[in-house]
Structures are given as structure tokens and as C-alpha cells.
Amino acid sequence: MTDPRHDLPRPGPAKGTHLRQIKSYVLRAGRMGPGQERALEALGPRFVLPYDPTLRFDPMAAFGRDAPLILEIGFGMGDATAHIAGLRPGDNFLCCEVHEPGVGALLKRIGEQQLTNIRILAHDAVEVLDHMLTEATLDGVHIFFPDPWHKKKHHKRRLIQPPLVARLATRLKPGGYLHCATDWQPYAEQMLAVLGAEPMLANTADASLGGYAPKPAYRPLTKFENRGLKLGHGVWDLVFQRR
């Protein structure tokens, strides 16, 4: 039997593109479990889309319907993604993740929960954004708990930087939202500064809350987050809207 992973689109620069210093991911070690393997083989052909920088993403062709489109950058093992997609069946979710066990895990949840409103691109979201998504395409963007790159010398590797935020803003429709969350306060402060400096975005949070938003009801508490909260650790949500 052919290993289904051989057909999974691989991350990395596509032909005709140039290498970037900032990527939306960090490759992690990890092996797929049997359930993830089976999910990839059975559901991958339907829910995993090929990355093609020569084609513009067509929501109707991908989902078979016209509905609000939410881009998620880096879904990890897919727990929150599947939860949100189940709560919001009227929305379409285009989800980018290069970690193969995570792709398999989300496919497994798609099968278990019989979700139909998720599509996966196993590719760097920055390149997806640049080459497959046109301006004013998205109704929302989710970026939950990106790598905080704790050391100061690594801060330049953080995903939330002015150039990316500017590109995200152009892909949002007027009134669309960008929702970021982090459990690392210094990164939350950087996010707030970067997002607040983007002229196309407006903070939805009350100034009395310091610029941070209450956790939206659709975002679930992860096991890691719950454990951190019990230990007194903070979590910061930022929700900005396209002007």
C-alpha cells in the first residue's frame, strides 16, 4: 500500500518563489499514529488541498458553497479548529499547518465529528497568503498561540510582524476580524503594538481593558491553557477589525 504521506503537499518554497526569513511555522519532530494515518488515507483526498501558487483559491470549488471564509494559521493538533468549526457550521475554515501529525489529527476529528466546513493546506501560510489569496477575500483570521520565541535574539522570528499584519489586513474584507491569542505576556505586548500600528485595523477591545479582548466564546480553552490558568499564568486575546 502506498504511504498516504507521500501525497501530502510538502512545506517549502515553491518554484518561482524566494526564500523568506519569516515563516508561519517551525518544523517539529513527531510521528503519525495509526489513527492519524488512517484518517489521512481516507479523508486527505477530500479535505487536504494542494498548494498551487499559480492558482487563486476558489472557495466555491473548495467547499461547494458560498459562506464566510476564515483563515487559520497553525492549528497544531486541531483541537480548537474542530471545536470552532463545529460551533460555526455556517462558516468555511481554510486551515494551514505543516506538521503532519497535526494534519492527521485534525482529519481524524473531522471524521469523528462529521465536519464538512474545514479544508487544509499543508503549506506555509505566508506563501498561501501571498500567492493564493486575493485582497478582500477573508472574513476572519485566527492565529492562536504562535511560537513566542522567548529569547530576545530570536524575536525577529516571531510571526506577528508589521509586514505580515499588513498583508493580512489587505486580505480581510472591510469588517473582517483578526484574532490572535498568546500565553506569553511579552509577545502579547508586541502583538498589541504591531496590530495597533496597522492603519487598516481597529482594536475592538475597550481601552479600559488595556487593549486586550475578553476571550471570544468560540475559542475553547485548551488543556495546556487550562493547566496554565490554574497555575496563575495569563492568556491574552487580541481582536482587531478591518476598517
Image (cartoon, grey):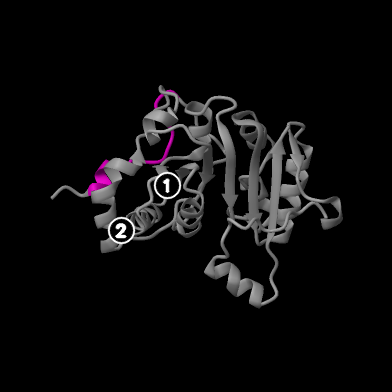
Classed neighbour count for the residue bearing mark 1: other residues with Cα under 10 Å, few (<14), some (14–19), many (≥20) = many
In the image shown, does 14 or 173 lie closer to the viewer? 173
Prevailing secondary structure of the magenta residues: loop
Image height check: is 52 above or below 48? Answer: above
Residue indicated by mark 1: 98
In the displayed image of the protein, which residue is found farthest to the left?
A: 1
**What residue is at 57 percent from the left and 38 percent from the top?**
21
Residue 225 in which image quadrant: bottom right
The stretch of residues the image draws in magenta is 4-16
Image height check: is 191 above or below 168? Answer: below
- Tell me, yes or no, whether the highlighted magenta stretch contains residue 182: no
Q: Is residue 191 left or right of residue 141?
A: right
Counting from the top left corner in percent of width and height, residue 17 is at 46, 26
Classed neighbour count for the residue bearing mark 2: other residues with Cα under 10 Å, few (<14), some (14–19), many (≥20) = many
Quadrant, the C terminus: top right
Q: Tell me if I can see residue 232 in this picture.
A: yes
Residue indicated by mark 2: 36
Q: Nearer the viewer, mark 1 or mark 2?
A: 2
Type of the residue with mark 2: Gln
Counting from the top left corner in percent of width and height, residue 120 is at 40, 43
**What residue is at 48 percent from the left and 53 percent from the top?**
81
Q: Is residue 163 left or right of residue 11?
A: right
Please, what secondary structure does the residue beneath circle 2 have? Answer: helix
Counting from the top left corner in percent of width and height, residue 2 is at 16, 47
- Tell me, yes or no, whether the highlighted magenta stretch contains residue 5: yes
Please, what secondary structure does the residue beneath circle 1 have? Answer: loop
Q: Is residue 58 left or right of residue 21?
A: left
